[in-house]
Image (cartoon, rainbow, N blue to C red):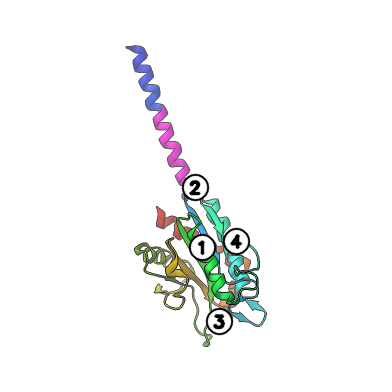
Amino acid sequence: MKKVFIFTFISVWFLILTVFKVDANNLTYPLIGKIIIIDPGHGGVDNGASYKLVYEDEINLSISLKLRNELEKNGAAVIMTREEDYDLSRPNALYRKKSDFDNRIKLINNSGADLYLSIHLNYYGNAKYYGPQVFYVNNFEENKIIAQFIQEELNKNLNTKRVIKININTNYMYPKLNVKGALIECGFLSNPQERKNLQSDEYQEKFAQIITSAIIKYYN
C-alpha cells in the first residue's frame, strides 16, 4: 500500500511539473508552435513608392527583418518571402509584376504557415496624411480580427486613429492566399515626419515590437 501511495505521489508530482513547464514555456515563448510568413513588399527593380532616394522596398525589408527577430524571440518559426533586395519574378518574365505576385502566392500557400504579414508603405499626394493602416481581404473571417488586433495596438502605441479597411486595391494577390493574415501599410512615405521615422532603426524596432505584441494578443 505504501509503495502504491509513493508511486501515485511521484506520478502526480511529475504531472504537475510537466504542466508547469508547459505553462512556463507558453509564458516565455507565447508564439511557440506558430509558423508566420512575412512578405516584404516589392524589391529589386520594383522599388514601390519613393521620395527622392528613399525607397519603399528597402524600408519594407528592414522592418520585416526586425519583425522576424521579434517573432522568433517569442517562439514563432518565421519564413521570409525575401531576405535581400530582389523581387520574386522569374528571370526575363514578360509580365514581371504578375510573375512576382504569382511566386509570392505560391510561396505563401505552400509554406504551411499559420499566418502571413505583408509589409508595405503608403503614399499619397497630400503630405498631411500619416499613420499606419491595416488592410484585409474577407476570404477568411479571421482576417478582419487579425487586422483589428494589429490596428488597435498600433493606434495605442503610436497615438494614431486609423481604422482597418478591406483591401480593394490589390485584388490579384491577396484573395488567392490560403493562409490567413493582413497587409500592414506601415506609414506614409509622403509625410515628412513619418518618412523620417520610417528610416529610423529605433522606430522600425518599435514598430516590429508593436506588431509582435498584437500577434501575441491575437493568439492568447
Residue 67 left/right relative to 91: left
Residue depicted at x 65% and y 72%: 44
Q: How far apart are marks 3 and 1 (CA)?
A: 34 Å
Q: Are marks 2 and 4 in contact (CB under 8 Å)?
A: no
Q: Please give the residue where the numbered disc 4 appears in the rendered image.
A: 65
Q: Are marks 3 and 1 in contact (CB under 8 Å)?
A: no
Residue depicted at x 53% and y 85%: 127
> Between residues 43 and 7, which one lies in front from this camera angle?
43
> Between residues 103 and 72, which one lies in front from this camera angle?
103
For marks 2 and 1, the one nearer the N-term is 2
Q: Please give the residue where the numbered disc 3 appears in the rendered image.
A: 191
Horizontal and vertical percent for residue 113?
A: 48, 55
Residue 29, which numbered label?
A: 2
* Amino acid type shown at disc 4: Leu
Q: How far apart are marks 2 and 3 (CA)?
A: 36 Å
Task: Name the mark nearer the viewer: 4 or 3.
Answer: 4
Q: Residues within 10 Å of mark 1 (few under 14, many from 20)?
A: few
> Between residues 103 and 24, which one lies in front from this camera angle?
103
Q: What stretch is highlighted in magenta?
A: 14-27
Task: Name the mark nearer the viewer: 3 or 1.
Answer: 1
For marks 2 and 4, the one nearer the N-term is 2
* Amino acid type shown at disc 1: Lys
For marks 4 and 3, the one nearer the N-term is 4
Q: Please give the residue where the numbered disc 1 appears in the rendered image.
A: 106
Task: Name the mark nearer the viewer: 1 or 4.
Answer: 1
For marks 2 and 3, the one nearer the N-term is 2
Q: Does the magenta run of residues contain 25?
A: yes
Q: Residues within 10 Å of mark 4 (few under 14, many from 20)?
A: many
Image: 25 above or below 182: above
